[in-house]
Amino acid sequence: MLKTFLSVTCFALVPVFAFADSHVTGDAEAGEKVFRKCKACHAVGEGAENKVGPALNGVVGRAIASGEGFGYSDVLVGLGGEGKTWTPEELDAFLEKPRNYAKGTKMSFAGLRKEDDRKNVIAYLASFSGEGS
């Protein structure tokens, strides 16, 4: 019985620890409001498709420049080729000022100056799987 309890307990805690390790600390609901600034170029959710920017379903934890069917800038392709992924920390740095993070990026957005806005939008993005659910 103890073995079963430990197996179930450990199994149940793994997703919690994985989420905690990813440092997604923002408020997804508040992030949905911040994401309105992004909607002109990006989509998330069921049926999301690439626009001027790539669809962002499953972006948190995904390799940089790996979204299907989108033509990324050379600098982002290079970062992805180096094995970089969109961790919450990398997304935070990119979203603060995209052109400083990736000189030569096609993304013309100036960035999100407020740390809380970046944390919240990252939490919002983390709520979408690769399929958009």
Image (spheres, rainbow, N blue to C red):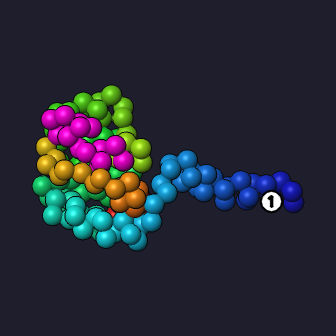
For the C terminus, the image quarter is: bottom left
Q: Is residue 124 visible?
A: no
Q: Nearer the viewer, residue 33 or 80?
A: 33
Residue behind mark 1: 5
Asked whether residue 98 is drawn in magenta, I would say yes
The dominant secondary structure in magenta is helix
- Whether residue 66 sits left or right of residue 105 in the image: it is right
Q: Determine the residue positioned at 35% across, 47% down.
A: 91
Residue 11 pos. (x, y %):
67, 55
Vertically, is 76 above or below 123? above
Crowd around label 1: few <14 · some 14–19 · many ≥20 (10 Å)? few
Q: Is residue 46 visible?
A: yes
- Whether residue 46 sits left or right of residue 115 in the image: it is left
Q: Determine the residue positioned at 25% across, 45% down.
A: 97
Query: Which contiguous range is marked in magenta?
Result: 92-105
Q: Determine the residue positioned at 29% across, 53% down.
A: 113
Q: Determine the residue positioned at 87% across, 60% down.
A: 1
